[in-house]
Amino acid sequence: MKKVLADIQSGKFVRDFMIENAVGQTYFKGTRRLNDQHQIEQIGKTLREMMPWISAGKMVDKTKN
């Protein structure tokens, strides 16, 4: 936490964030891809498919938005 706070206070966090976005978010997208392949995500997807009431109560109507 102290290192993260130091990065924020020094401006390093923002510089790294801007560079990451400038090059197409390669690290962010790679991390997201790895997380999507994690076993808990695969099981969660299967479980959500078994619960139709979850998708029925969504706040966003994708047919309209």
Image (spheres, grey):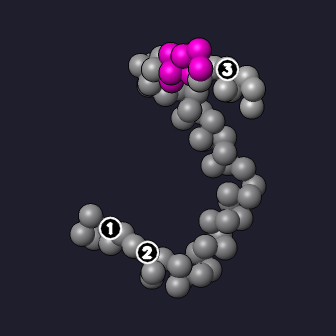
Which secondary structure, mark 3? helix
Q: Vertical placement of 8 versus 53: above or below?
A: above
User: Dividing the picture into quarters, in which one does residue 60 lie?
Assistant: bottom left
- Quadrant of image for the N terminus: top right
Q: Position of residue 53 (x, y in %)?
A: 52, 85
Name which residue lies at 54% across and 35% down: 29
* Residue 19 appears left or right of 49: left
Q: What residue is disc 1 on?
A: 62
Residue type at the position of mark 1: Lys
Q: What residue is disc 3 on?
A: 6
Name which residue lies at 32% across and 72% down: 61
Which secondary structure, mark 1? loop
> What's the magenta region?
9-17
Q: What residue is disc 2 on?
A: 58
User: Dividing the picture into quarters, in which one does residue 4 lie?
Assistant: top right
Label 3 environment density (alpha carbons within 10 Å; few <14, some 14–19, many ≥20):
few
Residue type at the position of mark 2: Lys
- The answer for how far apart the CA atoms under marks 3 and 2 are is 39 Å
Q: Vertical placement of 6 versus 41: above or below?
A: above
Which secondary structure, mark 2? loop
Residue type at the position of mark 3: Ala
**Which mark lies nearer to you, 2 or 1?**
2
Nearest the eye: 54 or 59: 59
View extreme (front): residue: 9
Label 2 environment density (alpha carbons within 10 Å; few <14, some 14–19, many ≥20):
few
Q: Vertical placement of 59 versus 11: above or below?
A: below
Q: Where is residue 33 in the image (x, y as percent from the top left)?
A: 60, 41
- Is 13 colored magenta in this rendering? yes
- The answer for how far apart the CA atoms under marks 3 and 1 are is 41 Å
- Quadrant of image for the C terminus: bottom left
Q: Which of marks 3 and 2 is nearer the N terminus?
A: 3
